[in-house]
Image (cartoon, rainbow, N blue to C red):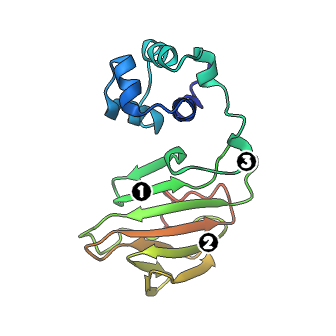
Amino acid sequence: FSFRHTHRNIRRIRLEKNMTLKDLGEKTDLSISYLSMIERGLTSISLSTLQKISEALGVGQTELSVQDPHSHDGIVRSYQSSFVKLESSNSIFSDLIDNDIFIPRPFDSKLITILQSHNIVPSFLFTHSGEEFIYILEGMLTLLMGKQTYVLSAGDSAHYHSSIPHEWLNRTDRLVKFLAINSDPHADYYGHPDE
């Protein structure tokens, strides 16, 4: 029994049955906020809770855990994205590719949000494999690359070899959002400081 696809299936089946989170909450005695967190994959789910939800949806528990037959169409809904929040960098990394579709993946794609920050001096620059392309969606990103500093605004982009020491900073009081695409699907965005 696998929980890997459970959160997606709960939402999909609930919507197919034209049920709101409130409807599901009333049938299961679970709060709307907790159900929302389950559907977004932000919390674990116990077998007893899974039983309540499956009964309320009128399906078996196994139906909630099987892979959605439509999940391999290359579409990743906003509520399906997995994300990692890095406290040290005040950044949120959201996957834009369903890792189950292309194995091995030909590239890696992330939506990165850097929260407002007062830390304007990086502790170190990063290097990793591949080539990187970034496209700024919102805010002003400070890109440190080698010994150069660039300030990029919405609509600007940059392409560089990831082996060049680099770092992304938000030196403003607003959010910065950008796409980061790396030619190496195994590139480690989270950590290899350049020594």
Secondary structure of residue under mark 3 = helix
Could you tell me residue 188's position as x and y percent?
Answer: 56, 57
Residue 17, placed above or below residue 42: above
* Residue neighbourhood size for the residue with mark 1, other residues' Cα within 10 Å, grouped as few (<14), some (14–19), many (≥20): some
Instruction: Give the residue drawn at x 49%, y 46%.
Output: 79
Kindly identify which residue carries mark 1: 92
- Name the foreground residue: 130 vs 178: 178
Of the numbered discs 3 and 1, the one sitting upstream in the chain is 3
Instruction: Give the residue drawn at x 73%, y 53%.
Output: 105
Kindly identify which residue carries mark 2: 132
**From the viewer's perspective, is the residue at label 3 or at label 1 nearer?**
3
* Residue neighbourhood size for the residue with mark 3, other residues' Cα within 10 Å, grouped as few (<14), some (14–19), many (≥20): few
Kindly identify which residue carries mark 3: 73
Instruction: Give the residue drawn at x 47%, y 35%.
Output: 39
Q: Give the residue type at disc 2.
A: Glu
**From the viewer's perspective, is the residue at label 3 or at label 2 nearer?**
3
Q: Give the residue type at disc 1.
A: Ile
Could you tell me residue 192's position as x and y percent?
Answer: 51, 60
Q: Is residue 8 left or right of residue 46?
A: right
Could you tell me residue 17's position as x and y percent?
Answer: 54, 29
Asked whether disc 2 touches disc 1, contact meaning CB atoms under 8 Å apart, the reply is no
Secondary structure of residue under mark 1 = strand
Residue 169 - label: none
Residue 20, placed above or below residue 182: above
Could you tell me residue 32's position as x and y percent?
Answer: 33, 32
Label 2 vs label 1: CA separation? 18 Å
